[in-house]
Amino acid sequence: MSEEQAAILRPETLVEEFKKNGVTHVITIPDSETNYLYELMMEQPWLDIIPTSREGETFSIALGLSVGGKVPVCLIQNTGMMESGDSIRGMALDSGFPLVMVVGYRGWTRHGVITDSAARYTEPFLNAFRINYYLVESNEDGKRISTAFEEARATKRPVAVLIGDEYHGFNR
Amino acid sequence: MISAADVFRVFQTHRDKAIVIPTGTSGRHWRDFSTNEKRDLTMGGAMGQTTAAALGIALGLPNEQVVLFDAEGALLMNLGILATIAGKQPQNFYHFLLDNEC
């Protein structure tokens, strides 16, 4: 793999990590920024995709699936995560089940100044809910996704994976 | 208008082994009629989210009958869930909507 390839996060990496960790369902909101990831997930025979209309639903559906013994993942953007505060509280945290939430980190940049308030409030929001998180920016960070799954299983709590490379390769 | 109690009374005779999820003010009366409380579930406390949680159970347990007694105010808070349910079309999910006229 070239240095340039390693520097971006391939959607395939995300899907491979899901498979490795026994994910059965991805509950998500399809959007134009992540259409390639969505199409890739739809092609996987072992994975059931549940498209929703609002991010708060994803945590509630995940709770129900967990009751049924499935392994759900919530795949949303940071803006929707903030809109989902009451669902995260009442469904994910209060119910106490392992849940990895993969969150697109809109507005985040390692270089320069963050100007998007969506990015500015993302980590403070997670800290307020005492939800631990792992930043994933490139393929080299892919193993951190498995770390998040291990932590969620051990603590029976939600753990977030912040995708800091939303606009490279997820949209084709 | 038929009362929630009458709905529950009639439903109970047809319940068999269905998992029942009541919500809202009317749903509280389900416990007066249920004869199998081990298969009754209450789903967390997030506003308007019981419908989505019940859908998740139906999708997670496709061999079980899942019955939701929903409340109109709760459903109004998250009407988009109807599109999600329509998209997945779970054949084992029975969604009753109770209107307490609030």
Image (cartoon, coloured by chain):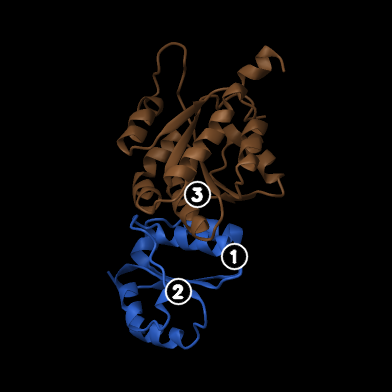
Chain colours: A brown, B blue
- For mark 1, name the chain: B
x, y (%) of residue B93?
Answer: 54, 69
x, y (%) of residue A129?
Answer: 33, 39
> What amino acid type is highlighted by mark number 1?
Pro
Residue at the location (51% across, 62% down)? B57
x, y (%) of residue B69?
Answer: 41, 72
Q: Left of A120 or right of it: where is B11?
A: right
> What amino acid type is highlighted by mark number 2?
Arg
> What amino acid type is highlighted by mark number 3?
Ser
**What secondary structure is marked by label 3?**
loop
Query: Which residue is the site of mark 1?
Result: B90
Query: Which residue is the site of mark 2?
Result: B39
**Please, which residue is most extreme toward the top here?**
A112
From where the camera sits, is residue A111 visible?
yes
**What secondary structure is marked by label 2?**
helix
- In this view, A72 is above or below A133: below
State the image quarter where residue B76 is shown: bottom left
Cα–Cα gap, marks 3 and 2: 29 Å
C-beta proximity under 8 Å, tags 1 and 2: no
State the image quarter where residue B40 is shown: bottom left
Residue at the location (37% across, 56% down)? B77
Cα–Cα gap, marks 1 and 2: 19 Å
Q: Left of B58 or right of it: where is A44?
A: right
Query: Which residue is the site of mark 3?
Result: A53
Between disc 1 and disc 3, the foreground one is: 1
C-beta proximity under 8 Å, tags 3 and 2: no
- In this view, B46 is above or below B62: above
